[in-house]
């Protein structure tokens, strides 16, 4: 799915429609209840909220979550904030539109070739952990509270109940800059390690957001697929699976 960074870019793009009245909604019935969503016609969009990878439009009636799944993209007024997703095709077709929302000034579409996108009224996000763009100290507190866990640090970072919004690429990138082996158990990491990791998550998230998404890191998709060497020390990069996710790390400086 789009990572938290992509969700942040989508949320930012959707704010263009804040203050405007919804005039029409077309929904693919396999992705949302068109009768329920039709009740939003006539409502005004008053805000956009995001927590982790989740994005919702707030209206003066219900809120509606736009869930993008793995390959869903948001297009606002004909412009896609992200041209292509790491796991999706580079092109889009109109028949992949799963939601088309017209307003009195512009429109919003969710385009998803795999049809996994979902649209839900008044979503419950109460089980999510703190947002990944929280201050570094809060991220450190959240990680230190989980030090009893026996899982690997990568598995912990992907757990949306602990920190919401971290995806595979941002996790690998943060561990790379922290010099931490993704296989390390949480219990083996001290407070200094976890605070340093939290700081790196914060800095990396800000940096990659300004560059345009989670695919813009040092461990870019090109580098990830090429089995290249570590840009820091020239050691071969390792590729393994952790929690079912392809994991790239340097066996030399990540210990
Ligand atoms: Zn290295």
Image (cartoon, rainbow, N blue to C red):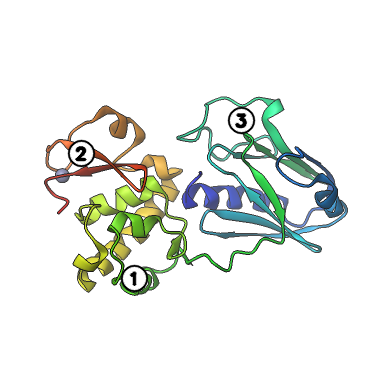
Alpha carbon separation for disc pair 2 and 3? 32 Å
The label on residue 238 is 2
**In front: mark 1 or mark 3?**
1
Residue 88 position within the rendered picture, expressed as x and y whole percent measured from the top left = 51, 31
The label on residue 113 is 3
- Neighbour tally class for label 1: few under 14, some 14-19, many 20 plus, Cα within 10 Å: some
Q: Residue 156: which quarter of the image?
A: bottom left
- Kindly check if marks 1 and 3 are in contact, taking CB atoms under 8 A apart as contact: no
Q: Is mark 3 within 8 Å of ligand 1?
A: no
**Of helix, strand and loop, which one carries label 3?**
loop
Q: Is residue 131 left or right of residue 152?
A: right
**Residue drawn 44% across and 67% down?**
134
- Neighbour tally class for label 2: few under 14, some 14-19, many 20 plus, Cα within 10 Å: some
Residue 181 position within the rendered picture, expressed as x and y whole percent measured from the top left = 20, 52
First in sequence, mark 2 or 3: give its number: 3
- Neighbour tally class for label 3: few under 14, some 14-19, many 20 plus, Cα within 10 Å: many
The label on residue 146 is 1
Q: Residue 39: which quarter of the image?
A: bottom right
Q: Is residue 16 left or right of residue 71?
A: right
First in sequence, mark 2 or 1: give its number: 1
Q: Is residue 100 left or right of residue 226?
A: right
Residue 75 position within the rendered picture, expressed as x and y whole percent measured from the top left = 65, 38
Q: Is residue 174 left or right of residue 59?
A: left
Ligand 1 image-quadrant field: top left
Alpha carbon separation for disc pair 1 and 3? 37 Å
């Amino acid at each position: 799915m789009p990572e938290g960074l992509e969700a942040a870019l989508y949320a930012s793009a959707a704010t263009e429609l804040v203050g405007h009245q919804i005039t029409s909604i077309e929904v693919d019935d396999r992705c949302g209840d068109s009768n329920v969503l039709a009740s939003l016609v006539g409502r005004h969009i008053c805000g956009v909220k995001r927590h982790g990878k989740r994005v919702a439009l707030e209206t003066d009636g219900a809120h509606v979550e736009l869930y993008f799944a793995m390959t869903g993209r948001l297009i606002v007024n004909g412009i896609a904030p992200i041209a292509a997703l790491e796991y999706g095709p580079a092109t889009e077709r109109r028949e992949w539109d799963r939601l088309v929302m017209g307003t009195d000034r512009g429109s919003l579409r969710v385009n998803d070739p795999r049809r996994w996108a979902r649209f839900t009224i008044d979503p419950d996000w109460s089980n999510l952990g703190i947002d990944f763009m929280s201050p570094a100290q809060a991220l450190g507190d959240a990680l230190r509270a989980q030090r009893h866990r026996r899982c690997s640090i990568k598995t912990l970072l992907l757990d949306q109940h602990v920190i919401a919004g971290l995806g595979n690429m941002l996790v690998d990138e943060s561990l790379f800059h922290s010099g931490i082996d993704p296989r390390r158990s949480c219990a083996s990491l001290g407070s200094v390690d976890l605070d340093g990791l939290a700081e790196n998550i914060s800095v990396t998230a800000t940096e990659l957001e300004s560059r345009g998404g989670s695919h813009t890191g040092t461990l870019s998709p090109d580098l990830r697929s090429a089995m290249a060497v570590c840009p820091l020390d020239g050691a071969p990069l390792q590729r393994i699976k952790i929690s079912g996710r392809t994991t790239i790390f340097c066996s030399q400086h990540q210990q």
